[in-house]
Image: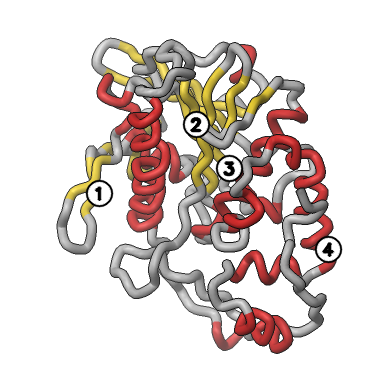
Amino acid sequence: MSDTIFTVELPLVETNEELEKVKQMYPKYDSYFIASGCCRERREKFDKLWKKYKPYADRHFLNQIRTSFHQRSWEMYVGNVLLEKKLIIQSQNEGPDFVIDNVAYIECVAPTKGDPAKPDSVPEMFVATKPEEFRVQDVPVDKMILRITQSIKDKALDQYENWKNKNWFDSKTPFVIAVNTGDLSHIEDPGMPNVLKALFGFQFMQINVKTGATNFSHRNEVSKTNNEPVPVNYFTSEEFGFISGVLFSAKIVLNHSENLGDDCVFVNNPFAKNSVNESFVRLFKNWTVNKEDDKLSLKKNY
């Protein structure tokens, strides 16, 4: 395999105008792939990850990263993080993105903003360049949650169903979904990540004015623009108990932490049929969710 993920001839550029010309030369390629390949600093950062991940990449990786840059670069980053944590991983052309010996299957997803022409896509965040351009803008939380739930369903849940008929599949192996929401761009609620809102139905923080106690309002679904309901409660019942937990990051891979994995957070599924070993959970910042009678208790451990 190539020593770089940028396997097409991309010139280094210094201006946005030059970059736009290169993008026009490769209209079918992901714009982030082009931008990263045309910047020396970005190029070196991604190729450093590639050097370590290369032995584990499937045969489609270098072709697919040209058109699905966020998704495949996230997979590459997760691979680096697992290796940094001294875990023994396998990655094949078929099946989950990673098999960690005696630990879990891991499948990576990275939701994008979606097609701008469709009403449920996440709009670009407006960035002011001059003081007179400053303006208030809404954070499209529901649309971001819809993108997260859709990506989990389309890539992870549907694929898991397909794996069940394969000879290598072991129903007792924990299943973890690794989710990166960095491409959604908008600022997240610091007290409750969007991934948790998509899994547990959390919505707004509520404060008891007498005691100061806090909790979050809850909902079971979010409605699309056409009023079609979409569930946001995967981790509140046994229906999705085959998912053991989610490992997530809100940073695009380009902005990953200096210490690989410091930007990754794990949350367990309290209804999981196969729980992930605690030694794996402790490798990451994490939230602990427990069932208490008919309620769920959530604890942030970082």
Q: Amino acid at mark 4?
A: Glu
Q: Are marks 4 and 3 in contact (CB under 8 Å)?
A: no
Q: Estimate the spatial distance between the alpha carbons at disc 2 and disc 1, rounded to whole Å.
A: 31 Å
Whichever of labels 1 and 3 marks the residue nearer the N terminus, that label is 1
Q: Estimate the spatial distance between the alpha carbons at disc 4 and disc 3, rounded to whole Å.
A: 22 Å
Q: Estimate the spatial distance between the alpha carbons at disc 4 and disc 2, rounded to whole Å.
A: 33 Å
Q: Amino acid at mark 1?
A: Val
Whichever of labels 2 and 1 marks the residue nearer the N terminus, that label is 2
In the picture of the structure, the residue carrying the numbered disc 1 is 222
Pair 4/3: label in front: 4
Q: Which SS class for mark 1?
A: strand
In the picture of the structure, the residue carrying the numbered disc 4 is 41
Pair 2/1: label in front: 2
Picture residue at 63% right of the left edge, 85% below the top: 130
Q: Which SS class for mark 4?
A: helix
Report which quarter residue 55 is drawn in.
top right
Q: Is residue 165 visible in this depiction of the protein?
A: yes
Give the answer, above or below, for where 171 lies relative to 94.
above
- Quick one: 253 or 100, which is closer to the camera? 100
Q: Estimate the spatial distance between the alpha carbons at disc 4 and disc 1, rounded to whole Å.
A: 40 Å
Q: Position of residue 271 (x, y in %)?
A: 34, 17
Per the rendering, the mark at residue 95 is 2
Q: Estimate the spatial distance between the alpha carbons at disc 1 and disc 3, rounded to whole Å.
A: 22 Å
Crowd rating for badge 1 (residues with CA inside 10 Å; few <14, some 14–19, many 20+): some
Picture residue at 53% right of the left edge, 39% below the top: 108
Q: Are marks 1 and 3 in contact (CB under 8 Å)?
A: no
Report which quarter residue 195 is drawn in.
top left
Picture residue at 29% right of the left edge, 40% below the top: 232
Q: Amino acid at mark 3?
A: Ser
Whichever of labels 4 and 3 marks the residue nearer the N terminus, that label is 4
Q: Is residue 255 left or right of residue 208?
A: right
In the picture of the structure, the residue carrying the numbered disc 3 is 249
